Amino acid sequence: MSNAAQLAALRAELERRRDAPKRVTWADLPFGDGVYRFHLGRKEIAELERLCGFKDAEGNHRPLGIGGIFSRMARGRPLLPSGEPDWTQVSAAEILASEIIERDAVETIRLALIGGGSGEVAGEPVVVSANRAQQLVSTYVVGRPIEDAWTIAFAVLGLAMFGVELPTKSVTTNAEPDDPVAA
């Protein structure tokens, strides 16, 4: 493909994305005792990359980029041609084909709860602090089947990577989702 053809393809893709419905990188999801907002903002992504990193041959800690974490989490997950997870094809064989690291899933969930910062329990709004996020993870993730954490963490990483169309109303704050305070 010539440079002119590549540039034309890039322009067409950027125009398609510009005209597409607005996407967000958070979602209000059922979890534990309620519905919580999950969001990996820049601070949470940087911390996740650090926590999921590795030591190089010289013993220096190297962060693992969000793309690498998502790739590791995605191995074994069936995907639709659109790149979205095919939730109808979940099976035990997926876990056997995966490269899931429990820490990746646990830290993704904890940090996304912190980044989301809110929830709804028994119809009442709640604030999710770092301590509350740790309590939720300790209660509803640690010691339970890894597949459950893998499913949530994979969905949260997918939100960070690809986003979803803007919902019409936020469940956890009853505010319009494009309101900067709610988002």
Image (spheres, grey):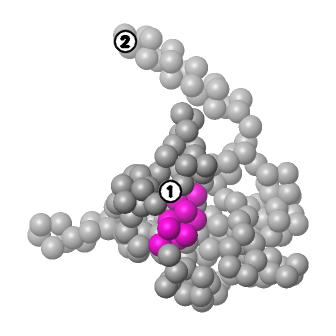
Q: Amino acid at mark 1?
A: Ser
Q: Residue at image x 58%, y 28%?
A: 14
Q: Position of residue 16 (x, y in %)?
A: 64, 26
Q: Quadrant of residue 152?
A: bottom right
Question: 165 or 146, which is in the foreground?
Answer: 146
Q: Which residues are magenta?
A: 146-155
- Indicate the secondary structure of the residue bearing disc 1: loop
Question: 52 or 73, which is in the foreground?
Answer: 73
Residue closest to the far front: 92
Is residue 65 inside the magenta stretch? no
Q: Residue at image x 73%, y 81%?
A: 33
Is residue 154 inside the magenta stretch? yes
Q: Is residue 140 left or right of residue 48?
A: right
Q: Identify the disc placed on residue 1.
A: 2
Q: Residue at image x 68%, y 79%?
A: 32
Which residue corresponds to mark 1?
91
SS assignment for the magenta stretch, majority: helix
Q: Position of residue 177 (x, y in %)?
A: 80, 57
Q: Amino acid at mark 2?
A: Met
Sort mark 1 into few (<14), some (14-19) or many (20+) by Cα contacts within 10 Å.
few
**How many labels, in total?**
2
Question: 40 or 101, which is in the foreground?
Answer: 101
